[in-house]
Image (tube, rainbow, N blue to C red):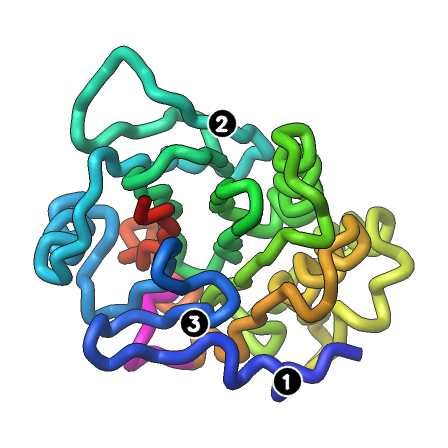
Amino acid sequence: ELDIRNFLAMITYNPDLKIFCSTLINDDRYFSGFSSRDQGDARNIDNIIKYFNQQYISFKRLIILEQIHSTNIEVFQESEYQEQVEKLEDKDGVITNLPEVILIVRNADCVPLVFLDKLKGVIGISHQGWRGSLKKMSIKMVEQMTQLGVEKENLRVAIGPAIGACCYDVDDDRYYSFLQEFDGYSDKIFFKKKGRWHLSLPLLNYLQLLNSGVKKGNIDFFPFCTKCDRKRFFSRRRSKTENFEKMFNFVVKIK
């Protein structure tokens, strides 16, 4: 059983930066964070750029994924285009070893994951909603990073703000899809409330990371729910509209 109390001291809120940060990831060489409502709607890229400029965080490139709930992963290297902001179409994961390149995914209930190997200097970020979680996106990110020479025992992962099982009820079709794929996890990731199955996507991704070979002590777990915490987070389920606002999540190798 996962006891989220073990993780409360690891992902903390920085009142100066007005973001949540993982102590497993951040140091003088690497910087990552999970935004809140304070930074505005991340659908507006100007809000993202404004945040980094206000915090005097210098960068050469801003890589923003145009997410489609896939398991498509890009290994980003210097491209011929030198635009300050580059959008990667049809991608839900990106990995790089380049410095001063900020990798960004956006979410409003889906699970953001930040990856780092400090020995190899490789960073990554991915976005997984129910489709990506069902397709084992987090495991595919780990596999892709190992192909770049990363050792699993050195890999650190932070699971950012997402909807909790408390608020994520699913219909029977989705329940049976997950049950078929993750039968061994079913007693951990599901519970029933008022006749509806509730699913914990963050916990499912945590268990996938463990099974892929990431050390338990190398995984940070965000303990709150984006739908419950309306003061700090946007939520697709709470907004009940297709024009819902989003947060942004990022990681960068400083130098």
Residue pictured at 23% horizontal, 73% vertical: 18
Q: CA distance from mark 3 to mark 1?
A: 20 Å
User: Do callouts 2 and 3 mark residues in contact (Cβ within 8 Å)?
Assistant: no
Q: Amino acid at mark 1?
A: Asn
Q: Secondary structure at mark 2?
A: strand
Mark 2 or mark 1, earlier in chain: 1
Mark 2 or mark 3, earlier in chain: 2
- Quarter of the image with the N terminus in it: bottom right
Q: Amino acid at mark 3?
A: Thr
Is 31 rendered above or below residue 232? above
Q: Is residue 232 magenta?
A: yes
Q: Which mark is residue 226?
A: 3
Residue pictured at 18% horizontal, 54% vertical: 57
Q: Which residue carries the number 2 mark? A: 74
Residue 240 visible somewhere in the drawing = no
Residue pictured at 34% horizontal, 20% vertical: 78
